[in-house]
Image (cartoon, rainbow, N blue to C red):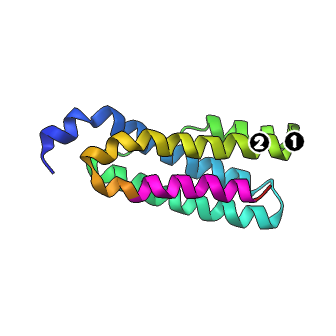
């Protein structure tokens, strides 16, 4: 891949990498507070999000740290709101990420698998309801 193309898309790639890292931590923490069947799904999603972060790291070369905001807020929302509300927010976030990756796929076709996973993740979380 041409370095100029990567640099032109650097901001979007870094944002995607950060979002995936944040999701790893969020799903890991959420798995600690949900019922065991749901926890297994969230642990699977955390692992897959980690692979996505690695895919973006391939382009950025940056080592980022996950931000804890979602990892604190989503488990708290789960505990204080209806399960349906929390899971709807999570699935919406997955669909939103997938939609954002559509523009990256035009330049980085291998991101298509990440995009597909994001929509699958949204469906998996919805299926828990």
Q: Position of residue 123 (x, y in %)?
A: 64, 56
The residue depicted at 61 percent of the width and 65 percent of the height is 44
Q: Is residue 54 magenta?
A: no
As drawn, is 73 to the left or to the right of 33?
left
Q: For numbered disc 1, what is the local secondary structure?
A: loop
Q: Position of residue 45 (x, y in %)?
A: 60, 59
Can see residue 8?
yes
What residue sits right under mark 1 in the picture? 82
Q: Is residue 115 magenta?
A: yes
Q: Position of residue 65 (x, y in %)?
A: 47, 43
The residue depicted at 21 percent of the width and 41 percent of the height is 6
As drawn, is 101 to the left or to the right of 70?
left
Res 82 quadrant in image? top right
What residue sits right under mark 2 in the picture? 86
Looking at this view, is 99 or 111 the one in front?
99
The residue depicted at 35 percent of the width and 50 percent of the height is 56
Contact between labelled residues 2 and 1, with CB atoms less than 8 Å apart: yes
- Residues in magenta, as a range: 113-127
The residue depicted at 87 percent of the width and 37 percent of the height is 80
Q: Neighbour class for label 1 at 10 Å: few (<14), some, many (≥20)?
A: few
Where is 25 relative to 7, above or below? below
Q: Position of residue 104 (x, y in %)?
A: 33, 43
Q: Main secondary structure of the magenta part?
A: helix
Q: Neighbour class for label 2 at 10 Å: few (<14), some, many (≥20)?
A: some
Question: How far apart in space, not on screen, are marks 1 and 2 (Cα)?
Answer: 7 Å
Q: For numbered disc 2, what is the local secondary structure?
A: helix
Res 55 quadrant in image? bottom left
């Amino acid at each position: 891949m041409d370095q100029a193309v990567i640099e032109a898309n650097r901001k979007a790639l870094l944002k995607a990498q950060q979002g995936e890292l944040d999701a790893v931590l969020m799903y890991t923490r959420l798995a600690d507070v949900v019922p065991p069947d749901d926890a297994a799904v969230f642990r699977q999603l955390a692992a897959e999000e980690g692979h996505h972060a690695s895919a973006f790291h391939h382009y950025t070369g940056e080592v980022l740290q996950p931000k804890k905001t979602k990892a604190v807020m989503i488990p708290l929302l789960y505990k204080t709101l209806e399960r349906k509300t929390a899971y709807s927010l999570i699935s919406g976030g997955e669909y939103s990420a997938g939609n954002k990756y559509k523009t990256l796929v035009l330049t980085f076709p291998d991101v298509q698998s990440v995009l597909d996973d994001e929509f699958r993740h949204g469906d998996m979380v919805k299926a828990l309801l």
